[in-house]
Amino acid sequence: MISSGSRRPTLKSPEHEQDWLDSLEDGMVDETPLDSALFRQSVSLFTTGIVVVTCEDDGKVHGMTVNSFTSVSLAPPTVLISVKAGKTNRLITRNGRYGACILSETQLPYSAHFSGRPQESLRPEFVVRDRVPTLQSCLAWFECAVLEKVEVHDHSLFVAQVTACGNEDGTPLMFYASRYHRRAIDS
Ligand SMILES: Cc1cc2nc3c(=O)[nH]c(=O)nc-3n(C[C@H](O)[C@H](O)[C@H](O)COP(=O)(O)OP(=O)(O)OC[C@H]3O[C@@H](n4cnc5c(N)ncnc54)[C@H](O)[C@@H]3O)c2cc1C
């Protein structure tokens, strides 16, 4: 086991809670600086799927690969993504809507394609089921309307309500320890 970091803020009483809330407003956490390589390695052990975020871009569709997609609440159906500054961030901010498409294990090339490594032979097909374009074929698709944009360091969290969704048969493409994986076991 590798570890780092020692002091953690504690909430012992209501007075401490106010101090803690004040420190959040200052955007400060009083901790020993963390080794960034260790953080990267440790957080990569959280297994995720792969999602292509899709946005309307003046009659075309722009896509971006993320693994920061997560569900926030079931009722109302709410999700979030964390997106660094760039084209997708600008388009979601302008449109107030985005699509999220969970890739199946057969769609690995899409992940590279939409993360800055265009695959010459790939011709992604998009469809608007209700209001937002999403991939015509994927494990699950969501059309999302942004509720809140929260700036955190160099990323924006786009919290959004799901306005339409659907899914099809298949198995997920997974991302773990900075590599792609396919399902190894059933249980
Ligand atoms: C596994 C993985 C997970 C990631 N997770 C995140 C994350 O959670 N958050 C985050 O901020 N970044 C994440 N990234 C990085 C992110 O995918 C890249 O930095 C991406 O290039 C940023 O996209 P952009 O829209 O900002 O800019 P761009 O680099 O301008 O666009 C993305 C790429 O997709 C191409 N493209 C877009 N639409 C189309 C289309 N319709 N047809 C053909 N090509 C198209 C563009 O040409 C470009 O190559 C992840 C990358 C990987 C590989």
Image: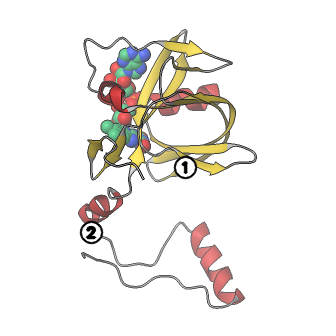
Q: Which amino acid, mark 1?
A: Glu
Where residue 114 sits in the image (x, y, percent)?
36, 26
Name the residue rendered at 26%, 26% in the picture.
117
Residue bearing mark 1? 151
Label 1 CB, ligand 1: below 8 Å? no
Q: Which amino acid, mark 2?
A: Asp
Is label 2 in a helix, a strand or a loop? loop
Residue 23 disc label: none
Where residue 99 sits in the image (x, y, percent)?
56, 28
Report the side of 57 relative to 5 (left or right).
right
Where residue 45 sits in the image (x, y, percent)?
33, 58
Q: Is residue 137 above or below residue 169?
A: above
Q: Is residue 36 above or below residue 166?
A: below
Residue bearing mark 2? 35
Name the residue rendered at 32%, 71% in the picture.
34
Quadrant of the displayed image that contains ligand 1? top left
The CA span between labels 2 and 1 is 23 Å
Label 2 CB, ligand 1: below 8 Å? no
Q: Is residue 184 above or below residue 17?
A: above
